[in-house]
Amino acid sequence: MKTSTSEGKRGIQWTDRMQLDDLDFAYDLTLLSQSQQQMQEKTTTVAAATAAVGLNIHKGKSEILRYNTACTNPVTVDGEDLEDVKTFTYLGSIIDEQGGSDADVKARIGKARAVCLQLKNIWN
């Protein structure tokens, strides 16, 4: 990941002194950028770095979520447009284009409610 982020500021401002470029866990990767151009540059760099070690980005599993932007230019990998989505799940948390946690909280409450209903038979 250092290869894709070492060329300058391409992430989002996290704190006054800290830039957040990506979220990594095992084989899951989320790239963060301020603009479509920065996202395209970062995606291209990551694709080249992974190809150099014999790995490929699975284009069918790669998605673009746009937050607070009117730009609809596609982000591509190897000439193929990545799918634009309004929501996705990362490590169990729902992330949506609204930027808040409402969808995630509602989903977690729904899951808890379902478990409580299953336990109701045991409690009665």
Image: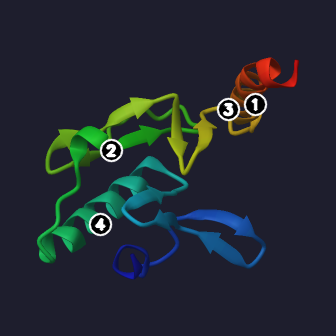
The residue lying toward the viewer, choosing from 43 and 35, is: 43
- Which amino acid type is shown beneath numbered disc 4? Val
Packing grade of label 3 (10 A; few <14, some 14-19, many >=20) is: few
Q: Quarter-wise, where is residue 41 in the image?
A: bottom left
- Which amino acid type is shown beneath numbered disc 3? Gln
Q: Quarter-wise, where is residue 53 in the image?
A: bottom left
Residue at x 38% of width, y 40% of height: 63
Task: Specify how the rendered protein is coloured.
Answer: rainbow
Label 1 SS: helix
Q: Position of residue 23 (x, y in %)?
A: 52, 63
Mark 3 and mark 4: span between their CA atoms? 26 Å
Which residue, given by chain and number where applicable, does mark 1 sit on?
112
Residue at x 69% of width, y 35% of height: 104
| Earlier sequence position, callout 1 versus callout 2 | 2
Which residue, given by chain and number where applicable, does mark 4 sit on?
46
Image quarter hosting the N terminus: bottom left
Looking at the rendered image, the disc whose residue lies closer to the viewer, 1 or 2, is: 1
Label 4 SS: helix
| Earlier sequence position, callout 3 versus callout 1 | 3
Looking at the rendered image, the disc whose residue lies closer to the viewer, 3 or 1, is: 1
Mark 2 and mark 4: span between their CA atoms? 13 Å
CB atoms at circles 1 and 4 under 8 Å apart?
A: no
